[in-house]
Image (spheres, rainbow, N blue to C red):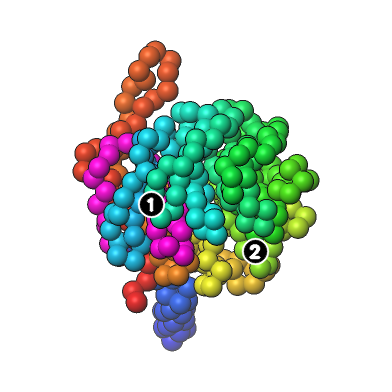
Amino acid sequence: MRSTRKQLFAVLIGGICFSVFLLADASGYHLLKKIPVVNSEGTWDFASIDDSARRLYVAHETQVDVLDVDKETVVGKIPGAQAAHGIAIAPDLGTGFITNGDGAFVTQFDLKTLRVLKTIPTGNLPDAIVYEPATRRVLSFNTVSRNSTVIDASTGNVVETIPLDGKPEFAVSDYAGHVFVDLVDKAIVARIDADKLKITDRWPVEGCDRPTSMAMDRKNHRLFVGCRNFLLAVLNSDDGKKLTTLPIGDNVDTTAFDPETGLIFSSTEDGIITVMHEDGPDSFRALDTIKTQNGSKTMALDLKTHRLFVPSGEVAKLPPATPGGKVRKKVAEKTFAILVLGREQ
């Protein structure tokens, strides 16, 4: 009897300790606010934050919505997009760039006035786009052409086209002259020298099915690559060596890293954000998951407030316009909004 009581007591204490451990590890992130954006029924894609101007840009099919992240209100829009996908911000030059997936061009705009400055030709179906500040160049990644259009951010002129030999999905800059892009159909991460305008390395990501999202710890030279087989791969950005993997949700599209808190976030189409932590350059662990909304697989991280801004809406799938065509999507009226997630201040 005493032995049984001791065993039950040990189980109880163990359960309490495990619960305390989980509470200690929890990120503390949850839904803080929902910002309605009711001026379009179009679907959305990537979102980007201009940290200095405190503005959030959300690609919203026929336009880019612009929000004040401190006041948490809509302040404007950039119209005339043709299936807007990504937004790159060049704050030092006062300009931004938008990829238009249904047109082979990038839109350049003024960050202060939101006025369109220029239309820049690219390869077919430009999607991801990144600003590389050391060279002041913008790289548009064109999924059908399987190449990258390099643009001089100061002039808006095309500098070069870099062949990729693979379908690009997302890209990040190390702010020191290099851009990393995942080639989703080849399970490869390519490193581009933005000054010499060529790929210098191609690293296979073993065990990663369709590498799709990417973020970077620039201080410790770590790449976080979201894979469509429920994994986040951690790579050394100097040599491409895979260090570890962590579990994430289904159909990842965006990953973000907060250098101040060490938190890694991966947003997936099943309506969750997986939160992980970098304990050290070679030590990583999963913390918890945050519920968002089904279909909300993109997000933007505000490095000042450490909050996440997640586009959301009730999406209906419509039959193709022509037999054998692409399934269309539509956001139900008055449901599009930006979810704000974070910790209580």
What's the CA distance linking mark 2 and mark 1?
31 Å
Name the quarter where the C terminus is drawn.
bottom left
> Can you name the residue that lies furthest to the left here?
334
Q: Residue at x 54, y 55 (%)?
A: 93
Q: In this view of the protein, which residue sits in the foreground, 199 or 257? A: 199
| Marks 2,1: beta carbons within 8 A | no
Where residue 344 sits, quadrant-wise, is bottom left
Residue furthest out toward the bottom:
2
Question: Which of the two discs, 2 and 1, labels the residue nearer the N terminus?
Answer: 1
Q: Residue 43 colored magenta?
A: yes
On the image, the x and y values in percent for residue 87 come to 48, 47
Is residue 258 something one can see in this rendering?
Answer: yes
The residue stretch that appears in magenta: 32-58
Q: Residues within 10 Å of mark 2 (few under 14, many from 20)?
A: some
Which residue shows up at 74% across the image and 53% down it? 240
Residue type, label 1: Thr
The residue positioned 69% from the left and 42% from the top of the image is 188
Marking on residue 113: 1
Give SS at disc 1.
loop
Quadrant in the picture for the N terminus: bottom left
Find residue 218 and name its label. 2
Left or right of residue 197, residue 89 in this image: left
Does 196 appear in magenta?
no
